[in-house]
Image (tube, rainbow, N blue to C red):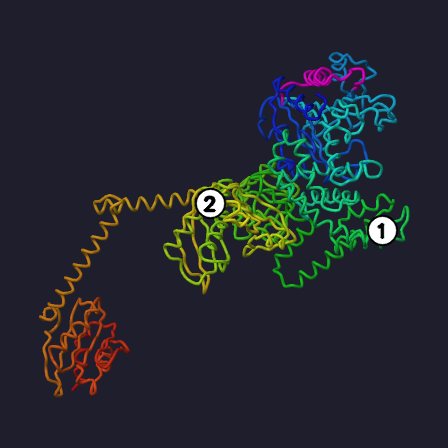
Amino acid sequence: MNSTNDIRRAFLDYFAANDHLVVPSAPLVPYNDPTLMFVNAGMVPFKNVFTGLETPPAPRAASSQKCVRAGGKHNDLDNVGYTARHLTLFEMLGNFSFGDYFKERAIELAWGMITKELGLDPQRLSVTVYHTDDEAFDLWRKIAGLPEDRIIRIATKDNFWAMGSDGPCGPCSEIFWDHGPEIAGGPPGSPDEDGDRFVEIWNLVFMQHLQEADQITGDLPRPSIDTGMGLERIASVMQGVHNVFETDTFRELIAASEEMSGAKAQGEQLASHRVIADHLRSTSFLIADGVLPSNEGRGYVLRRIMRRAMRHAHLLGADKPLMHRLVPALVGEMGQAYPELPRAEALITEVLEREETRFRQTLEKGLRLLDEETSQLGDGDSLPGETAFKLYDTFGFPYDLTEDALRARNITVDRDGFDAAMAQQKAAARAAWKGSGAAADGELWFDIAEREGASEFTGYAATEGEGRVVALIVDGKEVQRADSGQEVILLTNQTPFYGESGGQTGDSGTISGDRRLEMVVSDTSKPLGRLHAHHGRITGGSVEVGDTVHMQIDAERRDCIRANHSATHLLHAALRNHLGDHVTQKGSLVANDRLRFDYSHPKPLDADEVEAIEAEVNAEIRNNAPVSTRLMSPDDAIEAGAMALFGEKYGDEVRVLSMGRGDWQGSGRNYSVELCGGTHVKATGDIGLLRIISDSAVSSGVRRIEALTGEAARKWVVGREDALKAVAATLKTAPDEVLERVAALMDERKSMERELAEAKKQLALGGGGGSAPAADEEVGGVKFSGQVLHGMNPKELRGLLDEAKQRMGSGIAAICAVNDGKAAFAAAVTDDLTDRFSAVDFVRAGVEALGGKGGGGRADMAQGGGPDGDKADEAIAAAKALLA
């Protein structure tokens, strides 16, 4: 039972047998605590339970929680590889009581676990208690039988735990293991306590008080227990070693590093192998939990860890990227306990390989310049800050890496000079920005971004979380407080709310806080491309800068937006497949209730094309293929076949979204591969259904598709079906026979229209439809026929004039048809008279009398119209007068 995996399993089984709910490790990103970069202790996932904001999952719980200390105020990064116990990632075994058992049971469980389950020698164990905690002192004597000289009272804050300046707190009791007199060091509380002989292996926190401003103000109504035992530390004890890097998991990882690099883990190379083994663990778990390397926030800390490990791979003489080749060894060691590792193995491997390939180029250039700049420096000297900044600004060589590279030579770096150079660059950038003519309110955003840095978006993996308020804006100005009834823009250091960009609308939802804050967020914008601004109204309470707030997006609305956004990617691919590679996106709108997709194409889609495109997209949806995201440089992404989307601004790295069937038609890639920073479904099946509603023109060569997905598409289909049923009921037929019934009615109507037209024609020829019967008269020696008809379709006039010409043999005919107050006027001239008269002249005379202008046609037949049908008789008279 001495392996690390066995110890972890034994701990969890022991507490499960003692009525504890075993809960899986929470992700390393603490969405419930905006003050932390990463989860750094086993109790962090239960913070809201201990403060009463959440209901506990059970009265008792136990876990093996992965933790990272590599950023913010909890940072062990620089010590890793050079000490016996410092790690960036460690596992914290813990048992928790949420108002259930307290000190006595906690001590009983801890002593039983260590001495009975793990079999440690009680004679080599000692404990500490807070100097005023007589109850704990007496319980250790009673339960463990420890003599008083091995129950050590500690009067410092080291043995008093607090969640913060305000909140739960209480005394601690730590358990120590004695490695033996051959190791230097003394017991806790002694002058040489910092030695390695006595090692703390477990800490029991007795959460029993409440404090405000670091002063105890009362007792908790239900005292609780929070414990933590470092798995790597207890494994070193169980395995009889004094260094966590000598335990079985690290031995395996270091062995793999030795094999891959060809360098033995001894001498100066030993520290490098230890750094690589530790950093492999932390980077892999961070990537598995959704953190990707970037230049800000958590992503920057991840990149620092990765680059530190990659520099040590360089020191070992590895001639090609090393880190990604070690991932299988890590998955083999820890994948069973943490299934997220094998699930994300491909992503971890890809990210590590890409980062190391790029960084090796940066490292080579940076180290060359660093060697040149430090060639004249010796032990105890300092590198100028301006040089360190040049390495950072020109070659992307991080400051901390410069420090690390010079550490072995005992050369420091002028941090003040580096910071001054950085400030000078920011000032120059600000001056250039102000000189660009940017909007006045943009300076406000610039001030906030410069002061607070970019907002961290946590919404790819979460729909709620906590954030610290960094700015409040009311009426275009920054304020320190906002109260109920005010319209406000609220900014936090991190948020699950997506800010409108790339065609995707911003999230809505709610924000709440300790001052009885209730805020309804109607929209989220993204000023400068790196801030997330929550727009809304405070409906209750108040909020101040510095407050911690809880943010909850409208998850149902977000799901609809995600489905629509992912559907645009599938639609884009289908359009290119069916219409050609000339199709590119020209714009989009991704809302919760619909999607709009603009694309380049010279002509409308026909019905067959719409059906084929829609069918292909829905086939991909039904295939329910997973949607994956990778982080790449824009050039690498486009070279790999990714489509760049209209409206997106791309930095040094982009998110590459792949969805649909892999190896699409033998292409070696997924059905859709595009650059996109938006939120998307986890699998194409989450879209449900796509229905194209319309295809219309936007401008020359650009068309627009309107479409619906999911429930909206279903309701649209149901609405059309209900309409069909209503039509069927009206026609007194079945829905599937509506088409035949309508076709029959259309044929019947056409027949009736022909009959009606013939009847009107006969009526007109017989004189019943006009003001006077069609009669020939002699005008100026030429036969003339003029007639006014009411209700006659103007399209019938030419036929009537042809019959008049045949009847007269030689002459001129004019007809004025009146409908709804307007009139159509037509005239005809027989062929023998076209050299003397033109029908166009007669029409223009008649149209002028009708209050119109113009009219056109040929010499033998012409037609026009006018607005005043009451003057139909005058129009005929005008034509007749022209002949006279």
Residue 609 position by quadrant: bottom left
Residue 100 is covered by the magenta coloring: yes
Start and end of the magenta stretch? 98-126
- Numbered badge on residue 383: 1
Residue 57: x %, y % from top left: 58, 26
Residue 597: x %, y % from top left: 47, 54
Question: Mark 2 near mark 1, Cβ–Cβ under 8 Å?
Answer: no
Q: Residue at x 49, y 60 (%)?
A: 582
- Numbered badge on residue 620: 2
Residue 850: x %, y % from top left: 23, 76
Q: Nearer the viewer, residue 221 or 641?
A: 641
Mark 2 vs mark 1, foreground winner is 2
User: Looking at the image, is 190 positioned above or below residue 112?
Assistant: below
Q: Is residue 208 visible?
A: no
User: Mark 2: few, some, or many residues within 10 Å (few <14, many ≥20)?
Assistant: many
Quadrant for the C terminus in the image: bottom left
Identify the amino acid type marked 1: Leu
Q: How many marks?
A: 2
Q: Nearer the viewer, residue 428 or 41?
A: 41
Q: Nearer the viewer, residue 864 or 578?
A: 578
Say what secondary structure mark 1 lies in. strand
Q: Residue at x 59, y 31 (%)?
A: 53
Residue 806 is covered by the magenta coloring: no
User: Looking at the image, is 775 positioned above or below residue 258?
Assistant: below
